[in-house]
Image (spheres, rainbow, N blue to C red):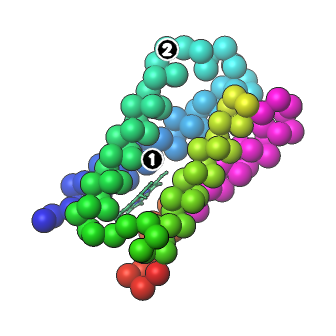
Amino acid sequence: MNTLWLKHLHISLALLSGALFGLRAYWRWTRPERLQLRWVRLTPHVVDSGLLMSAVGLMWLTQQYPLVQHWLTLKLAALLLYIVAGSFALKRGKTPLVRALALLLAVSAFFSIAGIALHHSTTW
Ligand code: HEM
């Protein structure tokens, strides 16, 4: 089956997810009250759910799974780091230092995920 359309959807949702995270991180420092807006709280959940669903679809269609393909295991681990660090950068971090370090970690994790996705080979 042609998986190209799903891969395009997956990449678009990943870019949207990263952009929304970047916007919320920016507002966390400049206009924190904006994080309480209904659409700002809701949209990332919708986008991230779509991203995960497209990931599950791609795994199924390409028959590649975490714990079997190492690049996918690594990708999933980096995704968990992105989620946890992201929540400290936006919400849980109590001091500016913690939030700044968490932001750095989350951004690095996001780019690692994209890097792993773009440079994996069938042997790892
Ligand atoms: C922020 C999160 C994510 C980003 C930025 C991202 C990025 C990408 C990119 C750029 C590709 C295209 C790679 C290519 O051209 O071959 C891709 C494909 C793929 N991604 Fe993701 N992804 C994310 C999350 C996930 C998750 C959580 C999973 C599942 C554990 C996943 C599974 C896959 C699979 C199976 C493919 C298809 C690979 C292939 O065709 O061989 N992705 N992803």
- Residue 103 is covered by the magenta coloring: yes
- Sequence-wise, which precedes: disc 1 or disc 2? 1
Q: Residue at x 46, y 18 (%)?
A: 39
Q: Nearer the viewer, residue 123 or 9?
A: 123
The answer to which image quadrant residue 61 occupies is bottom left
Q: Amino acid at mark 2?
A: Arg
Q: Position of residue 78 (x, y in %)?
A: 58, 58
**Residue 106 placed where, x, y %?**
65, 48
Q: Which residues are magenta?
A: 93-113
Characterize the local packing of mark 1: few (<14), some (14-19) or many (20 or more) Cα atoms within 10 angstroms. Answer: some
- Is 83 drawn above or below residue 61 in the view shown? above
Q: Position of residue 111 (x, y in %)?
A: 58, 58
Q: Amino acid at mark 1?
A: Leu
> Circle 1 sits on which residue?
15
The reply, left or right, for residue 10 in relation to residue 110 is left
Instruction: Indicate the position of residue 99 as horizontal and vertical percent values.
Output: 78, 37
Q: Name which residue lies at 26% across and 61% down.
A: 60
Q: Callout 2: helix, strand or loop? A: helix
Magenta-drawn stretch contains 26: no
Q: Note whether 78 is above or below 49 in the view shown.
A: below
